[in-house]
Amino acid sequence: MQLYELLRSWEPGFTSKGAKVHLARFNGRERPLDVFIAGNFDRWQAWQSRRNFSRRFVVSLIDAGGGRWLYAGLFEAKGATAVEKPKPHFIYDLQRIASANEYTGRLYVRSAYKERASYVRGETLDDDLEIAELLPERVSYGRFPGFKRVNLRKAQLDIIVLQNIESWRTALSNVKGIYLITDTSNGKLYVGKADGEQGIWQRWSSYVANGHGNNVALAKELGLAGPERRNDFNFSLLEIADIQSTSEEIARRENHWKEVLASREHGYNRNWGERHTNLSRPRVKCVRREVRPVVGRKSGIKRRCSMNKHGLIEAVAEKTGDSKAETGAVIDAFIETVTRAVSDGQTIQLIGFGSFSTGNRAARKGRNPSTGEEMSITAAKTVKFTVGKAWRIQPVDATH
């Protein structure tokens, strides 16, 4: 059976000479199947750079590869509005024919048509468009294919997350792991880790929210946030881990894959910290300064490293998978809470990390750091931090 026979049974007034067939293909920016599954096909098709729908009916088919086309609906063209800005185009009033909607997104046809034209006169495809398959349900990304078969374009990931598809959310939120982003335009790779409480789903959702998952390298170098680049990136899984796995365990596996795939040397991973350590280290700013000889102080060169608040927020956000805004709010709340409690005389004890408390410093004699002369220092109330046993302070290599 051929598609036209089916269309005539749904819409008796349909004729091939009264129809244009829209063979929707990848246009360099959007993939029609992604647009269709996202629910935006009708609006997408209505925008045309030319008067492509000059006949009463429009038969919409989406390229599925290998000569197969997905039936996207039968429309009646009611006219077009010319629009001059931002560039000249037409917005068509295409109304779906309700009687022909039952098989939309379910019916596949096969065609021998090999030309590249996307807007074809209906009679050109007479005796073509043979019905090949009818799906029980409308095509979607609803069925999770298994961890080993995950390979998503960024546009597909957007749809899955924004539609909150249950099978995907359930599978990906119950595992942590290591994932791979492939830039199909040049073959470069980015290896990332998902070690948050909601696993891979949480981490990948951040890419949907802002395009780059709060990762500086992806934001600046890949331009992943730009819609023109969405179809260049594929998301896949290298390794999954139990949801109870520690951040340290996940970080070790991430480092392993960065080494194996050489994504630091030839990809988009930035080489932060030592390459052969178990954990990546957050970025710090180190400066050298000369200490001038004064009374009571040795001269020489000292190396001083520090991380400011912005760097701390960035490091924590990368570790948890939360946004910088969310992380910054938590850190601000932590600082405010500790400051208020200690000011009221309370001791804040974080077992393993350390404790914040107040103390009294007695009056004493000291020296003016500029002149070296003896001076009196008055008594004062102080705030002190006592480090916990879990701290492991690594010796600083003064040659770097």
Image (cartoon, rainbow, N blue to C red):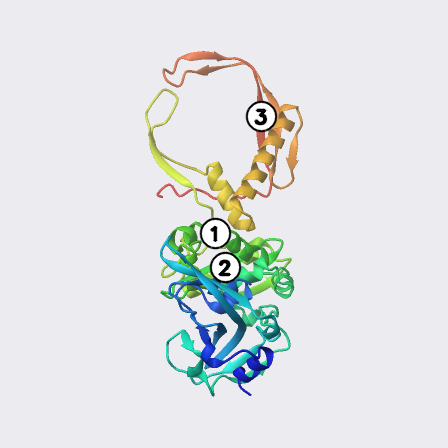
Choose top left, top right, bottom left or bottom right for residue 51: bottom left
Percent position (x, y) of residue 360? Answer: 60, 20
Q: Residues within 10 Å of mark 3 (few under 14, many from 20)?
A: some
Query: Secondary structure under badge 1?
Result: loop
Which residue is tagged 2?
Answer: 254
Q: CA distance from mark 1 to mark 3?
A: 31 Å
Q: Position of residue 209 (x, y in %)?
A: 53, 52
Q: Where 366 sits versus 124, above or below? A: above
Of residue 280 and residue 58, the one placed in the foreground of this image is 58
> Under tag 2, what secondary structure?
helix
> Mark 2 belongs to which amino acid?
Glu
* Residue identified by numbered label 1: 280
- Quadrant occupied by the C terminus: top left
Q: Amino acid at mark 3?
A: Val
Mark 2 / mark 3, whichever is N-terminal: 2
| Label 2 crowd bin: few (<14), some (14–19), many (20+), radius 10 Å | many
Residue topped by disc 3: 383
